[in-house]
Image (cartoon, rainbow, N blue to C red):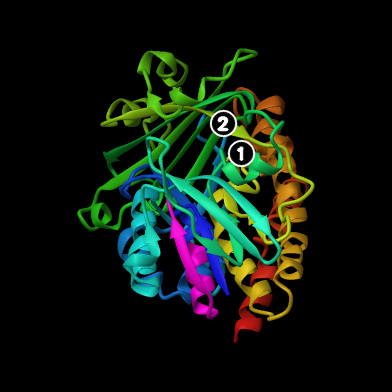
Amino acid sequence: MKIIVAGAGIGGLTAAMCLHRAGFEVEVLEAVSKLRPLGVGINIQAGAVRILADLGLEPALAATGIETRELRYANRHGQTIWADPRGRHAGLPWPQFSIHRGELQMILFDAGRRMLGDERIRFGRRLAGFEQTGKTVVARFVDRDGKTVERPAADILIGADGIHSAVRAHFYPDEGPPKWQGILMWRGVTVGKPFLGGATMVQAGHHTQKFVCYPISRKHAARDESLINWICDLHMGDQAMLPREDWNRPGKLEDFLPRFDDWKFEWLDVPEVIRAAHAIYEFPMVDRDPLPRWSHGRITLLGDAAHPMYPIGSNGASQAIIDGEAIAQELAAGDDPEQALRRYEARRLPPMARIVESNRRKGIDIMLDIVEQRAPRGFSDLEAVLPAAELEQIVADYKKLASQDRETLLKLAAARA
């Protein structure tokens, strides 16, 4: 069986390697002319690291990123609301990693080339259309000028082509642009001093004004410094979303830094970290509505093409990685490919729809809003503001929703053993 994966992102490359390992002939075609280590920080949850570890990638991840020890939520005064050990520090068989997105991309690409062969991952090929006839899918790929450069035929086409997916648009032509609810994000990386032990991810503030930070570089940690990935979220009110061509545009300090000028915590000087960034990028926080279907005959969706979501709970890339394993497992069952794709959809679409909808309702971040509403000036007794039972329920519900709870992950470990 021949499978074409449209898109060499995190989900597409993971899927390609899982499918190759299962014995399928796989080709990956990517729109960009050359893969470069672009982007900022990203977190890979333990449940997704399990899959990358099975592909032999844990040593490269450990040598590049930071094994996250703790996730900490704090109010806008820097007071801790909740702290949770992560990965192996929580007794799981796998770590969680905080890593530069571009470096993760290159780790996956290098591994994909070794597994599939250089000729099986091709660039400068944007999916422009496809036809499905009987048991065959013929895809049309074009170069940057719109000229057709390749028309490969395959048994299955996987659309792993991102939030602006051509595959998704083919089946849902009236969907329109991604959904925006008024939050802009400014992102950057800063070389600074280690904070909170040098392996902690922090989310501070509340829904309309939030600061996220975590270290992402093993090389910097070895020099007793920290490459800090940071994100500032601000709700901008009701206004038109930025045009697509303005996404990832350079950010201006004056547009957001004044709102964070007094965020000077005992463990981190937020405005100092922001000012020291070598580059700042701005883009809208967007998602799309859950779809009724991903699979149409021998064509399906994966990752951001299937379920773009708000970056809450570190789920975007982790869930795309899990998609890649799931589709390989269903196709490897050896029965009708269309039935396998329907099983993949039935397995992955419902939980992804729930995560998308939960993240729109703030997901696990709801604890930040509760504390801000009940104690805007800070607290001396967290139990009086957010009782432990209420907090634990928020955490448990979201972990279960995202399959990040200890019980689910240990079941996976037992099944693997």
Quarter of the figure with the C terminus: bottom right
State if disc 2 and disc 1 touch (CB < 8 Å): yes
Using a 10 Å C-alpha cutoff, classify the residue at mark 2 as few (fewer than 14 neighbours), some (14 to 19) or many (20 or more): many
Q: Secondary structure at mark 2?
A: strand
Whether residue 192 sits left or right of residue 2 in the image: it is left
Q: Position of residue 142 (x, y in %)?
A: 43, 44
Is residue 398 found inside the magenta-colored segment of the image? no
Q: Nearer the viewer, residue 134 or 126?
A: 134
Q: Which mark is residue 310?
A: 1
Q: CA distance from mark 1 to mark 2?
A: 6 Å
Q: Secondary structure at mark 1?
A: loop
Q: Which residue matches tag 2?
A: 285
Q: Which mark is residue 165?
A: none
Is residue 18 found inside the magenta-colored segment of the image? yes
- At a point 54% along the width and 59% down the height, the residue shown is 45
Q: Amino acid at mark 1?
A: Tyr
- At a point 32% along the width and 27% down the height, the residue shown is 272
- At a point 68% along the width and 76% down the height, the residue shown is 411
Using a 10 Å C-alpha cutoff, classify the residue at mark 1 as few (fewer than 14 neighbours), some (14 to 19) or many (20 or more): many
Q: Position of residue 96 (x, y in %)?
A: 49, 61
> Measured along the vertical axis of the image, is residue 343 above or below residue 413?
above
Q: Nearer the viewer, residue 398 or 47?
A: 47
Q: Which residues are magenta?
A: 14-30
Q: Position of residue 235 (x, y in %)?
A: 59, 21
